[in-house]
Amino acid sequence: MDAIGRLLDLRELTVIVDEQGNVTFSDLPADIREVARSISGVAMNDILTMGAGQLRDAVRNRELSPVEVTTAFLERVEAVEPQVHAFLHVDPELAFDQARKTEADVMAGRGGVLAGVPVAVKDIFDTRDMPTTAGSRVLEGFRPPFDATVVARLRKAGAIVLGKTNMDEFAMGSTGEHSAYGPTRNPWDTTMSPGGSSSGSAAALAALQAPLALGTDTGGSIRQPAALCGVVGMKPTYGRVSRYGLIAFASSLDQAGPMARRVEDAALLLQVIAGRDPLDSTSLDVPVPDYASQVNAGVSGLRVGLVRDFVEQDGVEPDIRKRVLETADVLKEKGALVRDVRLPHAGYCIAAYYIIATAEASSNLARYDGVRYGLRREVPQGGLDAMYRATRSEGFGGEVKRRVILGTFVLSEGYSEAYYQRATRARTLIRRDFERVFRDVDVLLMPTSPVAAVGIGERAADPLSEYLLDEFTVCLNLAGLPGISVPVGLDHAGHPVGVQIAGPPLSEVDLFRAAKAVEDEFSFYTEFPDL
Ligand code: GLN
């Protein structure tokens, strides 16, 4: 059954919270349902706009029940999904099972860090109880036998997994249009793309379908859609978060990270998912700070480098340039020391990224052969090779095929020196540029995306024009550095604008501090799209 169908089944499900905080279900009519809700004293709309930390506190203080919170968000999902298409799978029954379990934990005084907080999970993370497709036909019907480490950590912290979000196939894309299951639409303007590849996670947050979401970022897929949808998204330092159970695109670049409507909530989510995982040998064995408690530390004395080349580049829309410079002024007013910096090799980022990412993808995607996962297309009397070919021809979309072909070419005998090896050398130069600037500054300020909005279908005919949307985000992945996008307002046409703050390895605390100072100035989380 599709997501909407399942949700419709829940229409008459009512949650009653009595004065002792006990929760019961019943199939009561709508008017009684309203009475039941008012017992808790918190209206449904208030639940939708509360931050994750506030929801958690209300749950722990027994002002709200996890079941009630889950009901509010599932109803919202149902109401706006036809316009947004942020989800590939929603599972109300599972969500309520988890909510009841969390409820019991809270009653026993064991409410976790995210007790009762709903989370939307990008469909690239393995979930043992829900299908996992990575937005691809080739994984249609695939049900992983285990949870990704980050999903397991969320559940342990008491979070409620609402469902799996739409995305560009195998996270390859910047618009969400490369999903095999149809595009997601930007809640701020449904003729526009929400960005990608974590298109559904970003859109779900903007549409108030969830207070938290998980994304992945190989070249910008958390930060860019966060910017286009007016939400917060952080790509942590490479290795900060486990990749176990994350379907691989380009393993030396992939990183999971938090998305939320507020900086503090992103910090809370990172706190839960970060940390050493014996199942991922690239995960860092470094203690996880209490990020959320440090977001309000302010920026006094923080040395901020404004990346001039990026801000002044021709392709950057004037509104975006203006907002980045305004943000620099805000940081200065709040006590930061702002100066210009340059990254001399930044011009090579896009080329190096699209060579390295496709090379790694061509190897990672070789496993989808019709034998081990999801789709399998037999060719009568065709033999094994014909089955591989038919499965891949039908299972992979156009962009994925383009990348696999490109990646195979750049690694091929006689060409790998000219392409792959040179790209890895460029990567080293880019990394050194960053090492050099971080001797003089603590964080960098730059645009997240050169444009505020991309029309659906606008870049489909010209893949390069889509690749160029990543020019300010891919550098950080190549260097393994953390970056956060924080919304600062709307452009002249009413589309959200985000700015990006980056830092040296493991500087997430500083990024959250700086982003929170920016958020305090613009308070964009108090604005909502009209849906
Ligand atoms: N848009 C970039 C790409 O298509 C980045 C994707 C990502 O970060 N997963 O490769």
Image (cartoon, rainbow, N blue to C red):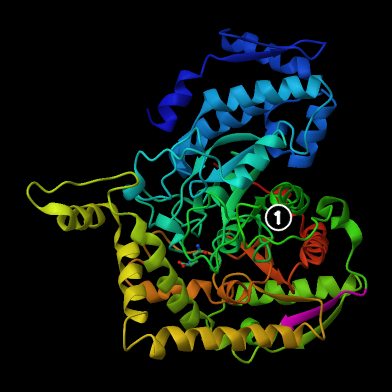
In the depicted view, which residue is nearer to us: 252 or 262? Answer: 252
In the depicted view, which residue is nearer to us: 514 or 458? Answer: 514
Residue 111 in the figure: left or right of residue 373: right
Q: Position of residue 37 (x, y in %)?
A: 70, 17
Q: Is residue 302 magenta?
A: yes
Q: Position of residue 108 (x, y in %)?
A: 81, 20
Q: Residues within 10 Å of mark 1 (few under 14, many from 20)?
A: some
Determine the image quadrant of residue 119: top right
Q: Position of residue 304 (x, y in %)?
A: 81, 78
Residue placed under numbered mark 1 in the picture? 276
Q: Is residue 433 above or below residue 320?
A: below
Q: Secondary structure at mark 1?
A: loop
Characterize the magenta stretch by its predominant secondary structure. strand
Residue 163 in the figure: left or right of residue 528: left
Quarter placement of the N terminus = top left
Q: Is residue 254 visible?
A: yes
Q: Is residue 179 magenta?
A: no
Q: Is residue 288 above or below residue 346?
A: above
Q: Which residues are magenta?
A: 301-306
Q: Is residue 207 visible?
A: no
- Image label count: 1
Q: Is residue 127 above or below residue 391?
A: above
Q: In percent of the image, x 81 and y 77: which residue is there?
A: 442
Residue 266 in the figure: left or right of residue 477: right
Amino acid at circle 1: Arg
